[in-house]
Image: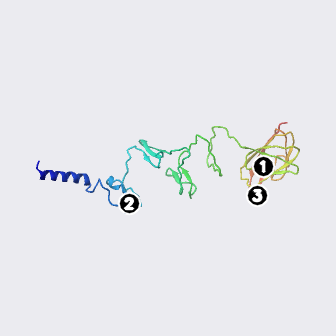
Amino acid sequence: MNKRFGAVLALVLVSVLLFGACGRPVSQPPESKSGKVPVGWLVADRLTVQEGGSNFYSTVDLNAELLTLDADLDSTIQAASDDIVLLALGDATGYLSIRLGNLRVGNGTPGSAQDGEDFYCEGKSEFDGAARFDGTTALNDDVTVAEAIVYTAGTVTPVQGGVTLVADLTFYYVISGGAYSMTLGTSGAVDGQMLILYGRDANNVTINDINLLSSSGGALTLGQYDIATFIYIGGSVNTWAEISLIADS
């Protein structure tokens, strides 16, 4: 092999290494005014990273490998198997936050307009653990309860001169040190709200005939171990209607 042929062969090899099949350098990145190295030149026709952002003109195939999101490499996304995508956050206190906008599951249309920080699920929702709803909850269809419904217990203590109960719970123990009275308040009550009172102490407590629709047509007496159940009727009626009174004796 003469010197001229060797030089030509070396030039061809260098050209292949530098320019590759796409006709542009693959061993040297293009110049960047920002001083950062764009990576779009690494994968032709797949990924373009420009100054100021990333533009995906086609697909990015991770081939079931991890996509690492944070600096310590422990928050990742991975398609571990076909059609199953796993998101792992590196710590139990980590969270996925949607700072603006809403989250939808399915292609249905929400019954209420989403206006920020809202969630809509077209299909079924299952909660294996505890679920807490701080706001008003509307149930627009039949509800099946597989376990017991447990009411948070409150207390009301009638005193000399009476007391007004503004009920924000369903179940109350009536604790009284004497034969005192109480009134059922209507402030904040909503149509269909239920109220259950249980007489705990050995005193008769009078539920005044104010905002009250009772079976006797007047005031109601709640003795020890008695249970009185009411339902609120709003509008112009604005009253607590007695549903039942279970007396211990």
Query: Is 61 on the left-hand or right-hand side of 180?
Result: left
Query: Is 136 on the left-hand or right-hand side of 51?
Result: right
**Crowd band around label 1 with a 10 angstrom C-alpha radius: few (<14), some (14–19), many (20+):** some
Q: Amino acid at mark 1?
A: Ala
Task: Using the rendered image of the protein, determine whether residue 21 is visible from the camera's viewpoint.
Answer: no
C-beta proximity under 8 Å, tags 3 and 1? no
Task: Using the rendered image of the protein, determine whether residue 9 is visible from the camera's viewpoint.
Answer: yes
Instruction: Give whichever of 209, 206 is nearer the camera.
Output: 206
- Image coordinates of residue 195 in percent, x first then y, are 75, 46
Q: Earlier in the sequence, mark 3 or mark 2?
A: 2
Q: Amino acid at mark 3?
A: Ser
Mark 2 element type: loop
**Crowd band around label 3 with a 10 angstrom C-alpha radius: few (<14), some (14–19), many (20+):** few
Instruction: Give whichever of 134, 205 is nearer the camera.
Output: 134
Q: CA distance from mark 3 to mark 2?
A: 74 Å
- Image coordinates of residue 121 in percent, x first then y, are 54, 49
Q: Amino acid at mark 2?
A: Gly
Q: In which quadrant of the rendered image does the C terminus lie?
A: top right
- The numbered dot on residue 236 is 3
Q: CA distance from mark 3 to mark 1?
A: 14 Å
Mark whose residue sits in front, 3 or 2: 2
- The numbered dot on residue 241 is 1
Residue indicated by mark 2:
35
